[in-house]
Amino acid sequence: MKIGDRYARGNPLGIGGMGEIWEGTDDRLNRQVAIKVIRPDRSAARRRFYREARILARLRHPG
């Protein structure tokens, strides 16, 4: 299954309070990624997700 014409979804990794985590592949950059799918009934989770994404975008680490 393709997500956003870019990501190929693989096997499920886990389920949490915000939604589900899947393994995946970024077809443009040819690398493994984790795909977080937020449950549609979780508007607070959507805000938390964007906050988390902004924080992680600032992270700089060689690994």
Image (cartoon, grey):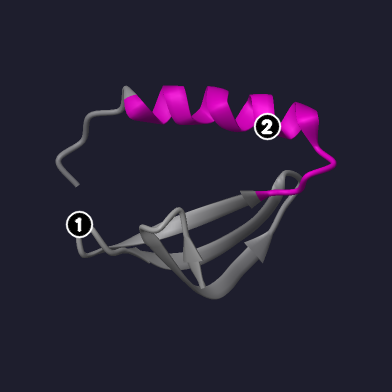
Secondary structure state at the residue bearing disc 2: helix
Identity of the residue drawn at 60% across and 33% down = 49
Give whichever of 43, 21 is nearer the camera.
43
- Name the N-terminal-most of marks 2 and 1: 1
User: Along the horizontal axis of the image, is 44 left or right of 54?
Assistant: right
**Magenta span includes 21:** no
Task: State the image coordinates of residue 40 (x, y, percent, origin top left).
Answer: 78, 44
Secondary structure state at the residue bearing disc 1: loop
Task: State the image coordinates of residue 18 (x, y, percent, origin top left).
Answer: 72, 44
**Is 7 situated above or below 19?**
below
Name the residue at the bottom extreme.
11
Give whichever of 42, 3 is nearer the camera.
3
Label 1 environment density (alpha carbons within 10 Å; few <14, some 14–19, many ≥20): few
Identity of the residue drawn at 50% across and 56% down = 35
User: Along the horizontal axis of the image, is 9 left or right of 20?
Assistant: left
Residue 46's tag is: 2
Q: Are marks 2 and 1 in contact (CB under 8 Å)?
A: no
The magenta segment is 38-57
Q: Type of residue at label 1?
A: Leu
Task: State the image coordinates of residue 22 (x, y, percent, origin top left).
Answer: 54, 65
Name the residue at the right extreme.
41
Residue 51's tag is: none
**Is 59 situated above or below 41?**
above
Task: State the image coordinates of residue 60 (x, y, percent, origin top left).
Answer: 22, 29
Identity of the residue drawn at 68% across and 32% down = 46
User: Along the horizontal axis of the image, is 23 left or right of 18?
Assistant: left
**Is 9 situated above or below 45?**
below
Considering the whole magenta stretch, tell me its main secondary structure. helix
Residue 29's tag is: 1
Alpha carbon separation for disc pair 2 and 1: 26 Å
